[in-house]
Amino acid sequence: MDIFAKIMAFIAAAIVQGTPLLFGATGEIITEKSGNLNLGIPGIMYIGGISGIIGGYLYEHFCADPIPILCVVISLLASILGSAFIAFIYSFLTITLKANQNVVGLALTTLGVGLGNFYGGSLLKFFGETGSISLYITGNAYKTKIPYLSELGIVGETFFSFGFLVYLAIIIAVLAQRFLDNTRHGLNLRAIGENPATADAAGINVSLYKYVATCVGGAIAGLGGLYFVMDYTTGAWTNNGFGDRGWLAIAIVIFALWRPKSAILSSYIFGGLYIASVFISGLSGSTKELIKMLPYLVTIIVLVFTSSRKKREHQPPAALGQSYFREER
């Protein structure tokens, strides 16, 4: 393989690895813009993945002749609903009951990983089957390439040979940026994240915005888990298979300076760093592990740099992680 082909293969692999990170980061940015710090994103991604698996499995199991498009639609809706429901639990605990956001987020991560592994390892047993989950029809439907464009030689293989979720992640990030910058509701959401008391005094329903932003953000993040199990592993479930991708998604939020559009390139950079060791020959096991630390190291460097410059646009929402008590305004 010549150097150009190797570079293009690396870019394609970075896009594949960066897509679940982009879903998670975009969802968390929307959530944090409302002032909610949801550290449950890793667990929500597990829930999104297992919910999609359950929806797809039930359809394939009970339908004699599954239709690929319905396999996609059913699993996609199941993933969105499952992820949004877990995000709703987080919202109820932190917005209505004023529970500590850090504690609730970490608890949901533990819950999401546990539920994902439990159902991923037990689903077949519920129906008297053995083995591991493998949704061949659904997984291949998600991996369907773009006709014609994917056949444009090495360029087509590098940029147009992915399933639709890769491009959906980019579209959602661009639309999220436009929503935050160019709409009244986006401005209201940002105002709540900066100063909920002032936003409340201006007649903005703080609780409603927080609920909607957190649930929508959770649903988007859950699609990262769905992409991993349906596209990346072709409809197969592996316990603890997501690794630390959920935490990387949260790190990208900082790296991208809370801008969904910046999260696109940031996710692919992190995706490339995540698998860089695979493309470098002759590395020892310990060196590969050190290379895998690079995304976190880069995030720390960016955090120190942006904090030292003290520019407001480089800082998180001022009310991030703080519960809002209306009677104290």
Image (cartoon, rainbow, N blue to C red):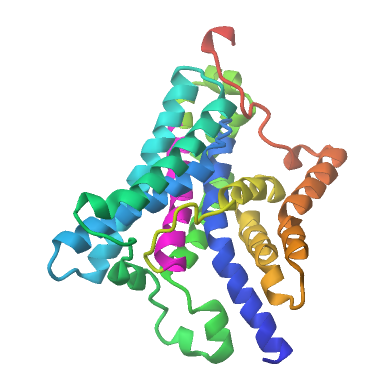
Q: Which quadrant would residue 254 be assigned to in this image?
A: top right
Q: Quadrant of the N terminus?
A: bottom right
Residue under the image location 73 percent in, 65 percent down = 285
Q: Which residues are magenta?
A: 211-233
Instruction: Give the side of residue 137 with respect to residue 327, left or right.
Output: left
The residue lying toward the viewer, choosing from 10 and 293, is 293
Residue under the image location 78 percent in, 46 percent down = 300
The residue lying toward the viewer, choosing from 113 and 131, is 131
Instruction: Give the side of residue 151 with respect to residue 5, left or right.
Output: left
Residue under the image location 59 percent in, 62 percent down = 18
Compared with 264, 280 (above or below) is below
Q: Which quadrant would residue 61 be assigned to in this image?
A: bottom left
Residue 204 in sight from this viewpoint? no
Residue under the image location 45 percent in, 28 percent down = 91
Q: Which quadrant would residue 32 be assigned to in this image?
A: top right
Total labels drawn: 0
Compared with 10, 328 (above or below) is above
Q: Quadrant of the C terminus?
A: top right
Instruction: Give the side of residue 243 with respect to residue 119, left or right.
Output: right
Residue 99 in sight from this viewpoint? yes
* Picture coordinates of residue 146, whole percent (x, y): 42, 79
Q: Which SS type dominates the magenta stretch?
A: helix
The residue lying toward the viewer, choosing from 49 and 26, is 49
